Amino acid sequence: MSAADKIMRQLLEQQADERAHRLATIAAEEFIRCNGLPTNNADEFVFHGPDLADEYVQDCIAHLRWVGECAVFENGEETTVLLGDYTMESLA
Protein backbone atom coordinates (compact mmCIF):
# COMPACT_ATOMS: atom_id res chain seq x y z
CA MET A 1 0.00 0.00 0.00
CA SER A 2 1.45 3.33 -1.02
CA ALA A 3 1.71 6.39 1.23
CA ALA A 4 -1.06 8.12 -0.75
CA ASP A 5 -3.35 5.12 -0.23
CA LYS A 6 -2.65 5.12 3.52
CA ILE A 7 -3.40 8.84 3.78
CA MET A 8 -6.62 8.42 1.78
CA ARG A 9 -7.67 5.49 3.98
CA GLN A 10 -7.02 7.51 7.17
CA LEU A 11 -9.00 10.44 5.79
CA LEU A 12 -11.95 8.22 4.91
CA GLU A 13 -11.90 6.61 8.36
CA GLN A 14 -11.79 10.03 10.02
CA GLN A 15 -14.73 11.23 7.92
CA ALA A 16 -16.70 8.10 8.82
CA ASP A 17 -15.98 8.65 12.53
CA GLU A 18 -17.08 12.29 12.32
CA ARG A 19 -20.28 11.29 10.50
CA ALA A 20 -21.07 8.62 13.12
CA HIS A 21 -20.41 11.16 15.86
CA ARG A 22 -22.83 13.69 14.29
CA LEU A 23 -25.51 11.02 13.83
CA ALA A 24 -25.17 9.87 17.44
CA THR A 25 -25.50 13.46 18.66
CA ILE A 26 -28.58 14.10 16.52
CA ALA A 27 -30.20 10.84 17.67
CA ALA A 28 -29.50 11.55 21.34
CA GLU A 29 -30.94 15.06 21.11
CA GLU A 30 -34.06 13.85 19.30
CA PHE A 31 -34.56 11.14 21.92
CA ILE A 32 -34.33 13.71 24.75
CA ARG A 33 -36.76 16.04 22.97
CA CYS A 34 -39.27 13.26 22.19
CA ASN A 35 -39.16 11.36 25.48
CA GLY A 36 -38.44 14.00 28.10
CA LEU A 37 -41.15 16.02 29.78
CA PRO A 38 -40.86 19.64 28.58
CA THR A 39 -40.80 22.38 31.18
CA ASN A 40 -41.74 26.03 30.88
CA ASN A 41 -38.15 26.80 29.88
CA ALA A 42 -36.95 26.44 26.30
CA ASP A 43 -34.94 23.29 25.53
CA GLU A 44 -35.36 21.92 29.06
CA PHE A 45 -36.64 18.39 29.62
CA VAL A 46 -37.23 16.37 32.78
CA PHE A 47 -36.81 12.63 33.29
CA HIS A 48 -37.83 10.79 36.43
CA GLY A 49 -38.81 7.42 37.81
CA PRO A 50 -38.40 4.45 35.51
CA ASP A 51 -37.03 6.62 32.69
CA LEU A 52 -33.84 7.16 34.68
CA ALA A 53 -33.37 3.39 35.01
CA ASP A 54 -33.37 3.05 31.20
CA GLU A 55 -29.83 2.51 29.98
CA TYR A 56 -30.52 4.23 26.64
CA VAL A 57 -31.68 7.41 28.42
CA GLN A 58 -28.46 7.40 30.44
CA ASP A 59 -26.38 6.80 27.29
CA CYS A 60 -28.06 9.70 25.46
CA ILE A 61 -27.52 12.06 28.38
CA ALA A 62 -23.91 10.94 28.78
CA HIS A 63 -23.20 11.42 25.06
CA LEU A 64 -24.69 14.91 25.00
CA ARG A 65 -22.72 15.86 28.11
CA TRP A 66 -19.52 14.50 26.58
CA VAL A 67 -19.90 16.58 23.40
CA GLY A 68 -21.00 19.67 25.34
CA GLU A 69 -24.54 19.77 23.98
CA CYS A 70 -26.35 19.78 27.33
CA ALA A 71 -26.18 20.59 31.00
CA VAL A 72 -27.66 18.12 33.48
CA PHE A 73 -29.13 18.87 36.88
CA GLU A 74 -29.87 15.94 39.17
CA ASN A 75 -32.28 16.38 42.05
CA GLY A 76 -33.11 13.18 43.85
CA GLU A 77 -35.29 11.04 41.60
CA GLU A 78 -35.48 13.68 38.87
CA THR A 79 -32.99 14.69 36.21
CA THR A 80 -33.33 17.88 34.19
CA VAL A 81 -31.57 18.10 30.82
CA LEU A 82 -30.97 21.56 29.39
CA LEU A 83 -30.01 21.35 25.72
CA GLY A 84 -27.62 23.95 24.34
CA ASP A 85 -24.04 24.60 23.32
CA TYR A 86 -21.82 24.14 26.36
CA THR A 87 -18.53 23.60 24.56
CA MET A 88 -15.43 25.49 25.61
CA GLU A 89 -15.57 27.48 22.35
CA SER A 90 -19.05 28.79 23.12
CA LEU A 91 -18.04 29.80 26.63
CA ALA A 92 -14.99 31.77 25.51
Image: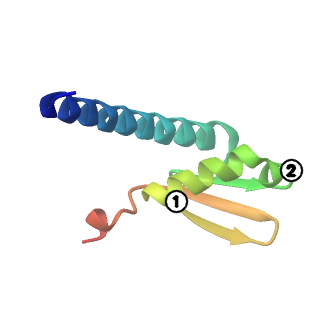
Instruction: Compare residues 59 and 77 and report the one nearer the observer.
Output: 59
Quadrant, the C terminus? bottom left
Q: Is residue 64 left or right of residue 13?
A: right
Question: Amino acid type of disc 2?
Answer: Pro
Q: Amino acid at mark 1?
A: Arg
Q: Which residue is mark 2?
A: 50
| Disc 2 residue crowd, few under 14, some 14–19, many 20+, Cα 10 Å | few
Could you say where residue 83 lies in the image, as x and y percent from the top left? 50, 53
Residue drawn at x 85%, y 55% as measured from the top left:
49
Does 72 appear above or below 50? below
> Is 51 displayed left or right of 10 in the figure?
right
Q: Give the residue at x 40% y 63%.
A: 86
The disc at residue 65 is 1
C-alpha gap between disc 1 and disc 2: 21 Å
Say which quarter of the image contains residue 67. bottom left
User: Which of pointers 1 and 2 indicates the residue nearer the eye?
Assistant: 1
If the image is split into quadrants, where does the N terminus sit? Answer: top left
User: Percent position (x, y) of residue 34?
Assistant: 64, 36
The image quadrant of residue 4 is: top left
Q: Is residue 75 left or right of residue 92?
A: right
The answer to whether 8 is drawn above or below residue 73 in the figure is above
- Label located before the other in sequence (1 or 2): 2
32, 56: nearer the viewer = 56
